[in-house]
């Protein structure tokens, strides 16, 4: 199975020998920067979907499912080129066939629920393993790793959720046409939001031409997208064009402070602006996707942060890892560690991703302990006041900024930059 995917990957231009780890392309530091065509091969290729919406709505009046499939395929070819699109479709065909085969065996009672869930997890992850392990710089047509940039990591989550749901409700028989529409729906193909198969199918059945309210909502989201783009341009101009992660001792303190604050802000703006673009596109089509961000800058605790950051990914982690492991009933700390270790590694084969995930787990475990202490002391119902809220906000944001710096530094896990900053500020 892995060998077959490796062959497909090589046909699409994946550099390096099969199953050999490579070096992740870091857009913050690596030069030359991504070309426009490389950017379109990633999440922001969704911009090319917008002019396809009017013909999609026109054809969908008579052939809704065919229109969604054809436009989804056309958009993928426009942004990924034909060779990469065929690799993506080949991967999706194999993964979908695996899920449907197991669902068929489950309906015949040849598989137990647990056996099917186990095989879903093993099979889908085995299919994505070559792309996870080979952190290639030459995914055609972009140097960005295909796992996250092209959307394989989000397809993985969606397919696992679909398979687990079919294991739990074996008599449900999804229409193949609806499933293909779900997989190829551009607003949730590359960077989420995660829209589960059953939810998409129910929205597809109720699909009507978008109302005036949805058009207005889409226009509002495009406005926010453009505003975020201005913010990205301003932040990008002030991020140092140097390898401040590797040799921070060579740069002025002001340069390091800029890097410390602006790199996480840039990452947030990239994700948030994409969310606004995806929601806008879905409004204009008429099949809504869910928000992935809910006023993140207002978070006043790590738990609150995760209620606002990548909301659909957080819901997936809760429903398909945390709750099945025992949730709040038993081994809570181990469950939290397992969830965020997986979340870190889901981003790719980098120690910085794992370290970031474990840092989130550690903070949530500490917060859980603090909540228990407050309850034991009878402080649980006491209002904190504005000063306490501001202090909690400052602590939350600085912790997240520091851990996102760890996330973004693939080679040194932020250790050199953070150590140098602490040393200078302490003197």
Image (cartoon, rainbow, N blue to C red):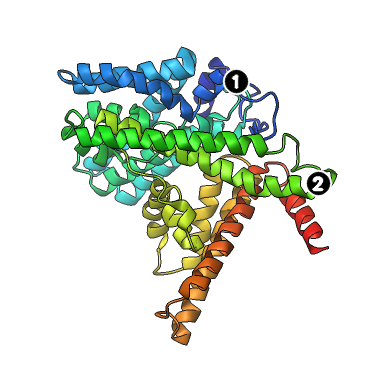
Q: Is residue 186 above or below residue 116?
A: above
Callout 2 crowding tier (Cα within 10 Å): few <14, some 14–19, many ≥20 = few
- Say whether residue 370 is left or right of residue 181: right
Q: Identify the element where label 1 is drawn.
A: loop
**Count the marks: how many?**
2
Residue 305 on image: x %, y %: 47, 57
Q: In which quadrant is the C terminus drawn?
A: bottom right
User: Along the polypeptide, which appears first: circle 2 or circle 1?
Assistant: 1
Binning the other alpha carbons within 10 Å of mark 1 as few (below 14), some (14 to 19) or many (20 upward) gives few
Residue 149 in the image, given as x and y percentages of width and height: 52, 31
100, 409: nearer the viewer: 409
Q: In front: mark 2 or mark 1?
A: 2
Q: Which residue is mark 2?
A: 252
Q: Is residue 308 above or below residue 244?
A: below
Residue found at the very far top of the displayed protein: 82
Residue carrying label 1: 35
Dot 2 falls on a residue whose secondary structure is: loop
């Amino acid at each position: 199975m892995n060998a077959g995917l490796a062959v497909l990957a090589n046909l699409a231009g994946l550099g390096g020998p099969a199953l050999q780890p490579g070096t992740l392309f870091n857009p913050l530091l690596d030069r030359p920067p991504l070309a426009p065509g490389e950017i379109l091969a990633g999440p922001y290729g969704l911009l090319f979907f917008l002019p396809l919406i009017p013909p999609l709505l026109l054809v969908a009046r008579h052939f809704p499912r065919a229109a969604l499939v054809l436009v989804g395929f056309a958009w993928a070819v426009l942004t990924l080129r034909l060779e990469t699109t065929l690799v993506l479709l080949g991967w999706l065909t194999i993964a979908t066939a695996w899920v449907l085969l197991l669902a068929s065996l489950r309906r015949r009672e040849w598989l137990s629920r647990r056996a099917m869930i186990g095989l879903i997890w093993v099979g889908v992850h085995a299919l994505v393993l070559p792309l996870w392990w080979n952190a290639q710089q030459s995914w055609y047509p972009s140097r960005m790793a295909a796992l996250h940039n092209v959307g394989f990591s989000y397809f993985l989550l969606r397919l696992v959720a679909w398979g687990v749901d079919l294991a739990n409700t074996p008599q449900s028989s999804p229409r193949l046409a609806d499933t293909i529409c779900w997989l190829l729906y551009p607003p949730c193909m590359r960077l989420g939001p995660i829209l589960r198969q059953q939810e998409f199918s129910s929205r597809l059945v109720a699909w009507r031409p978008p109302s005036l309210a949805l058009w207005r909502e889409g226009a509002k989201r495009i406005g926010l997208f453009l505003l975020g783009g201005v913010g990205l341009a301003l932040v990008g101009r002030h991020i140092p064009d140097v390898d401040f992660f590797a040799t921070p001792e060579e740069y002025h303190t002001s340069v390091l402070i800029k890097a410390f604050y602006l790199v996480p802000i840039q990452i947030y703006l990239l994700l948030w602006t994409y969310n606004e673009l995806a929601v806008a596109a879905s409004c204009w089509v008429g099949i809504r996707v869910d928000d992935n961000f809910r006023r993140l800058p207002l978070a006043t605790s790590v738990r609150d942060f995760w209620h606002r950051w990548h909301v659909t990914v957080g819901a997936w982690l809760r429903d398909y890892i945390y709750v099945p492991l025992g949730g709040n009933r038993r081994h809570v700390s181990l469950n939290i560690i397992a969830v965020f270790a997986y979340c870190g590694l889901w981003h790719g084969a980098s120690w910085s991703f794992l370290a970031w995930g474990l840092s989130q787990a550690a903070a949530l475990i500490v917060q859980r302990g603090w909540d228990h202490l407050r309850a034991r002391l009878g402080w649980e119902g006491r209002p904190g006041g504005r000063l306490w809220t501001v202090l909690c906000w400052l602590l939350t944001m600085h912790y997240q900024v520091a851990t996102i710096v760890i996330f973004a530094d693939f080679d040194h896990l932020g250790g050199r930059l953070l150590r140098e900053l602490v040393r200078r500020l302490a003197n």
